[in-house]
Image: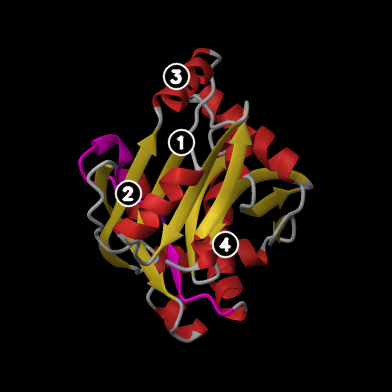
Amino acid sequence: MRQGDIVQKISIAGFSYARILTSGISLEEAEGLKKKFRYLHVYSYARAHILWCKERVQRTALIDLNQGVDDIFKKYSDTCKKHIRRGEKNADLKIVSEDKDSDASYRLYREVKKEEGAKPDIKKEFDNCLFFNAYYNGRMIVTMSFYDNGEYIRAKHTASLRREMGERAKVSAHASRMLIWEMCKWGKRNNRKFFDLAGLNLDDPSKKGIVEFKRSFGGDEMDIYMYRYATPAFSALKRVINLFGKNIN
């Protein structure tokens, strides 16, 4: 595990917790983190053997950023390429990389989650994330957040006003694909190695559209291993936060 793999160190109500994005973690490294934090959430691209953690295996799509930019784009589906090109021709659509307006990004995310009937993550869950946003006629219509450990980028959340835009919903679709393309280019410029699109839910038919969207970028499908550990006190804190309509992931 690299030092930069701790992508978040968060404190809430005096409880500290950490999120780790890593190519692999040893039991010894996990034991050291357990002594420092009340809650751990680890994303690992290699299976670990941490018996005191809950393990979940998730299928995901990983874009290899070691390729040339043109080679990355060639692997996109024809529909994906078409959406990106149409978006690039839309003078009213603006893409902002590393957007500093995290408050506006979170507000859009929170509003969309509530409309969907889901509990949004607390704002602190976005500490140290990268935000890439799309604006249409000056209004934010899509926000994407990402974890970044200096080697791997992993998508955290996407929220868009697609439903609200009605006949112009296609603009949101174009913007979403443009944002992924922009992150690929950003990753190349900043010497990142892999871009994880964060999960392919192959078991839930209602997620078919999201799976198709992620697969349209031509990434390599593989397993990622997620490990969680929480002290009893932190588990109680999570339940209290849930009662107030919020979530800790």
- Disc nearest the viewer among 1 and 3: 3
Q: What residue is shown with label 3?
A: 236
Task: Indicate whether residue 143 is drawn in magenta.
Answer: no
Observer-nearest of 217 and 227: 227
Q: What residue is shown with label 4?
A: 178
CA gap, disc 4 and disc 3: 40 Å
Question: Is residue 80 rendered to the left or right of residue 202?
Answer: right
Residue 38 at x, y percent in the picture: 47, 36
Q: Residue at x 59, y 67 (%)?
A: 182
CA gap, disc 2 and disc 4: 28 Å
Task: Indicate whether residue 196 is drawn in magenta.
Answer: yes
Neighbour tally class for label 1: few under 14, some 14-19, many 20 plus, Cα within 10 Å: few
- Disc nearest the viewer among 3 and 2: 3
Q: What residue is shown with label 2?
A: 226
Q: Quadrant of residue 67?
A: bottom left
Type of amino acid under label 4: Met
Residue 249, numbered label: 1
Observer-nearest of 174 and 245: 245
Residue 115 position (above or below residue 3): above
Residue 9 visible here:
yes
Residue 94 at x, y percent in the picture: 72, 58
> Which stretch appears magenta?
191-208
Mark toward the start of the polypeptide (1 vs 3): 3
Q: Residue at x 76, y 47 (%)?
A: 101
Neighbour tally class for label 3: few under 14, some 14-19, many 20 plus, Cα within 10 Å: few
Mark toward the start of the polypeptide (4 vs 3): 4
Residue 245 position (above or below residue 61): above
Question: Is residue 36 rendered to the left or right of residue 29?
Answer: right
Mark toward the start of the polypeptide (1 vs 4): 4
Residue 125, numbered label: none
Type of amino acid under label 1: Asn
Q: Which secondary structure lies at badge 3? A: helix
